[in-house]
Amino acid sequence: MRSQRPIALSGIAAAHRALPRAVVGVTTLAAATLLLAGCAADEEGTVRVASDGSTYVLPDDARRPEYRTREDCIADVTEQLAALRADGNDVDDDPESLCESSASYPGHYHSPWIGPILWGASLWNSNRVASWSPVRDGGFSWTSANLQPDVVQRAPAGAAAGERAPLKGGFGSSGKSGIGGAREGSVGG
């Protein structure tokens, strides 16, 4: 024979019993989401070989702007840095350091001057940019990599070209420093 009296709950069970099932379900889902977010893996990139043979991890969509003249590159990068500063970003990059001759990278670029390495989402509109080119093995130097530690990071020991490796931070994703935090936009030409 079943009792007609309700069962009295105490402790944690009493608190959960008092909440409607929908609230408990939403609370459980929110807690699970927060736990999983803390376990999310860093974004990954591809291990690439610099022109000197050292290995770095770059975003898969890494691009460099190409320019017809050094003056175009410096003027364009200067404008992008000024826009970042106006948006409140703490940027101390030097446009002259971020503009390089493409002569050091034969077969990689069509224009004589190239700008910084950027995440694909960080490309900007500019009439000065002749084109945007993907950054492949040999398409950058250890110097340009060291100038841009937010987007180009040393590969883990033993990593080979083409392997996947974690990227932390990132130009264009966090915008925490450097030119990669530039406004998103379509490619100019």
Image (cartoon, grey):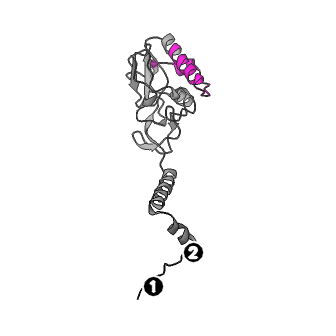
Q: Is residue 53 above or below residue 98?
A: below
Q: In this view, does 159 lie above or below 113?
A: below
Q: Is residue 120 left or right of residue 10?
A: left
For the residue marked with disc 2, what is the amino acid?
Ser
Q: Residue at x 43, y 16 (%)?
A: 129
Magenta includes 183?
A: no
Q: How many labels does the image show?
A: 2
Around disc 2, counting alpha carbons within 10 Å, would you say few (fewer than 14), some (14 to 19), or many (20 or more)? few
Q: Give the range drawn in magenta.
A: 75-103
Q: Which of 10 and 85 is in front in this view?
A: 10
Q: In this view, does 185 lie above or below 159?
A: above
Q: Where is residue 108 in the image (x, y as percent from the top left)?
A: 39, 23
The quarter of the picture where the C terminus appears is top left
Q: Which residue is drawn at 56% across and 28% down?
A: 178
Task: Give the residue number, with chain letter if any, for mark 2.
Answer: 10
Magenta includes 93?
A: yes
For mark 1, give the secondary structure.
loop
Question: Which disc is residue 140 wearing?
Answer: none
Q: Residue at x 57, y 74 (%)?
A: 10
Task: Give the residue number, with chain letter if any, for mark 1.
Answer: 3
For mark 2, give the secondary structure.
loop
